[in-house]
Image (cartoon, grey):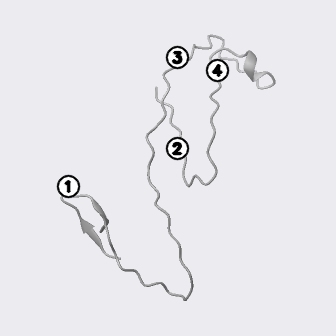
Amino acid sequence: MRLHSGSEGHWGLRPSQTVQLGYQGTFAVAAQGLVAATTETRTVADDPTNNFDTDAPDSNQGIQVHSFTVPPGTTLARFQFVR
């Protein structure tokens, strides 16, 4: 496959390409791409003692639990904490 520079200067594959595989047999492809982010806005309180109890993490100040599910078949999941 050859890469080309698009009209906006981005490099990528052309929308349609002929590809020759190095073996005989069936080959299947599936479209993949980014999904819009799910975002949350929260405020984490400061732990004025700066003493995190690892034996009882839920009893500490300055901690929040974020539950999430990554669906089966997901090829990439990204998580980001922004201060």
From the viewer's side, name the closer residue of 61 and 2. 2
What residue is drawn where x is 46% and y is 60%? 31
Q: Are marks 2 and 3 in contact (CB under 8 Å)?
A: no
Give percent across and percent down for residue 63: 64, 20
Q: Are marks 4 and 1 in contact (CB under 8 Å)?
A: no
Residue type at numbered disc 2: Arg
Residue type at numbered disc 4: Ile
Horizontal side of residue 14 vs 26, given as left or right: left
Q: Quadrant of the N terminus?
A: bottom left
Q: In the rendered structure, which disc, 2 or 1, sits on the residue that comes first in sequence? A: 1
Q: In the displayed structure, would residue 74 be above or below residue 15? A: above
Q: Residue furthest left?
A: 7
Badge nearest the viewer, 4 or 1 = 1
Residue designated by label 3: 43
**For the residue labelled by badge 1, is the local secondary structure a helix, a strand or a loop?**
loop
The numbered mark at residue 78 is: 2
Q: Are marks 2 and 4 in contact (CB under 8 Å)?
A: no
Q: In the rendered structure, which disc, 3 or 4, sits on the residue that comes first in sequence? A: 3
| Alpha carbon distance from label 3 to label 4 | 10 Å
Q: In the rendered structure, which disc, 2 or 4, sits on the residue that comes first in sequence? A: 4
What residue is drawn where x is 26% and y is 58%? 10
| Alpha carbon distance from label 1 to label 3 | 38 Å
**For the residue labelled by badge 3, is the local secondary structure a helix, a strand or a loop?**
loop
The numbered mark at residue 8 is: 1
| Alpha carbon distance from label 2 to label 1 | 26 Å
Residue designated by label 4: 63
Give percent across and percent down for residue 21: 47, 84
Badge nearest the viewer, 1 or 3 = 1
From the viewer's side, name the closer residue of 76 and 18. 18
Residue type at numbered disc 3: Thr
Q: Residue furthest right?
A: 55
